Image: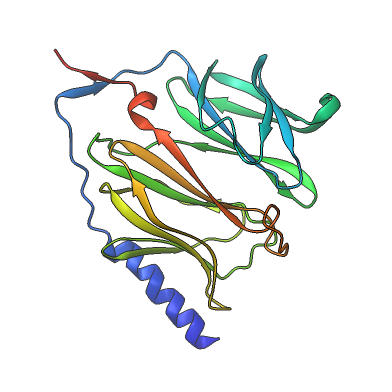
Amino acid sequence: MNVFFSTLVFLLAIVFCGCQCIPNLETDREISPSQYAKVMCVNALPNVEKIKITVGNILLHSALTYEMEEGFRYFNVPYGVINFNIAIKNDSIIYKGMANLQKGKAYTFFVYQMQRRAQGLLLEDDVSTYSLTNSYFRFVNLLINSPHSLLFSIEHQYPIVINLVFKTYTKFYTTYPDKYVITIKDAEKDSIIAQSKNFQLLPGKGYTIVLRGDYLDKTKRLGPNLLVIQHDFEQVFEINEKK
């Protein structure tokens, strides 16, 4: 056990000391604020086939599947305090929540399971400095029954490794466009939970790397699986060329 924790401390130190990515500042572009807030929805409920999502009086999805067949899309919604409602078939409500959305901000809304109930997690999709030539990524752990020893890593020339427990997440990190290996590992058991090799990070894009499913389930659908969401930041931040 002491070896495990020593290894974990060493890997976490890489996160703060290893990354030397410096944003490439773009001085010939400006960001225009939107008149709306933008919301993207993600279904992380493995036991629910389809969900209906309403934000305020706006229907965003009538049948958002776990497989995310509709793809990843931002919707314009009014800013301010607004209701989030999640329903299943027969319009049975399984979640209600409120959030204060800010004008011009973009958000990702995750619907996940905790203690047999649907829950919502709203994350702001923001980076401190945006450049069309860089790539961005973050980790989110929504794996039911997740152990405390999960290590999320992304690697090209060097690894970036972070320990995340259930319902926790990171900020967006800046890196450069290239192919990466994404790995989720149970360090205590020394076993790989999920992995994606040669995953391409594109310039100007953001990526949310989500682990979802149920750690205790061995089936392909309900067990642990990796979902990588692509954010079109050049649309989110409404980049305009200066004249």
Location of the N terminus by quadrant is bottom right
Location of the C terminus by quadrant is top left
Q: Position of residue 44 (x, y in %)?
A: 65, 44
Q: Residue at x 35, y 48 (%)?
A: 200
Q: Nearer the viewer, residue 208 or 181?
A: 181
The answer to whether residue 155 is above or below residue 71 is below
Q: Residue at x 71, y 64 (%)?
A: 218
The answer to whether residue 44 is above or below residue 91 is below
Q: Position of residue 67 (x, y in %)?
A: 62, 41
Q: Position of residue 232 (x, y in %)?
A: 39, 31
> Would residue 53 be found to the left or right of residue 156 on screen?
right
Q: Please identify the quarter of the rendering in which residue 14 is found.
A: bottom left
Q: Please identify the quarter of the rendering in which residue 66 is found.
A: top right
Q: Nearer the viewer, residue 183 or 199?
A: 199
Q: Residue at x 35, y 63 (%)?
A: 15
Q: Residue at x 51, y 27 (%)?
A: 73
> Would residue 221 be found to the left or right of residue 29 on screen?
right
Q: Position of residue 105 (x, y in %)?
A: 44, 26
